[in-house]
Amino acid sequence: MTEKSSADTDVRLGYISENLLEIRENIASAAKASGRKPEDIRLMAVTKTVEPIYIKYAIENCGIDLIGENKVQELLLKEPLLPLENVESHLIGHLQSNKARKIAGHVSTVESVDSVELACELGKRSLAVGVVTDVLLEVNIGGEESKTGMSPDELPHTLEKISVIDGIKVRGLMAIPPICENNDDLRRFFSYMRKLFVDIGDKNIDNVYMDILSMGMSGDYKTAIEEGSNLVRIGSAIFGARTY
């Protein structure tokens, strides 16, 4: 590493520390506004396109204990380069059924389960490597054709089928709301997700543990927490703008 690139790296590491300090303060404030404690909210560092040196720093120096990757291949390439002994890894991007065998055993949770077919394949592959994989059901809360996830109307029927699949455990819901022009519209999407989450939890379905509501990213995590999220997925606000 050249002297210039080393200096640039040091600057970016400093920004990561500062960013996480500010984010944790914002999480604490939003948690308080929703009648909860800061420790009730999980902070995920989304590591899409982030080089291992920066992820490693966030884990070892900034207390990050939960990371999320979008792509199977990227997760598997980074895995041996990171100190993950006490770190939870989630897959948060779309997962094709034919890649379930590659990810089983490498993450504790797949947050993007959107079909019975995928859930069956993930369950089968998880059992084959001797694990139970936690899953979140992805809801396309805005009905957008460009996004994956099941519709809110599909959710009860799909959940009923997924709940009986061996090798997986349903832990909650995940959603990405549409881009909204004002915060009130955004808040309504988050509020509706919270209602779905609570309603399902109240049904006490076997093998369904509604304890994770994953919603909120770099630009909207404070609103998401105020509306009930207990897991926020933050990437660029921690590591800076993504490079592709």
Image (cartoon, rainbow, N blue to C red):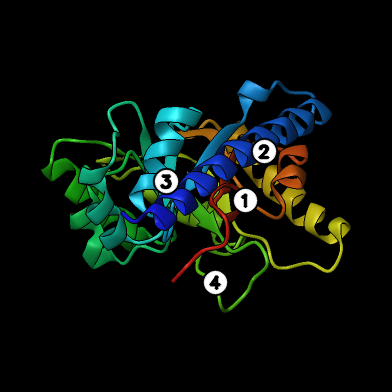
Q: Secondary structure at mark 1?
A: helix
- Alpha-carbon distance for marks 4 and 1? 22 Å
Q: CA distance from mark 4 to mark 2?
A: 27 Å
**Residue on which disc 1 sits:** 237
The residue singled out by tag 4 in the image is 147
Please report whichever mark, 4 or 2, sits nearer to the chain's N-terminal start: 2
Q: Are marks 3 and 1 in contact (CB under 8 Å)?
A: no
Nearer to the camera, 61 or 141: 61
Most extreme residue toward the left, as rendered?
A: 128
Q: Which residue is mark 2?
A: 23
Q: Are marks 1 and 2 in contact (CB under 8 Å)?
A: yes
- Point out the frontmost of discs 4 and 1: 1
Number of disc labels: 4
Q: Amino acid at mark 1?
A: Ala
Location of residue 179 (image quadrant): bottom right
Front position among marks 4 and 3: 3
Single out the mark in the foreground, 2 or 3: 3
Q: In terms of secondary structure, where does tag 2 sit?
A: helix
Q: Residue furthest front?
A: 3
Distance CA(mark 2)–CA(mark 3): 17 Å
State whether residue 51 appears in this view: yes
| Residue 144 vertical placement versus 119 (above, below) | below
Looking at the picture, how far across and down is residue 77, in whole percent? 23, 55
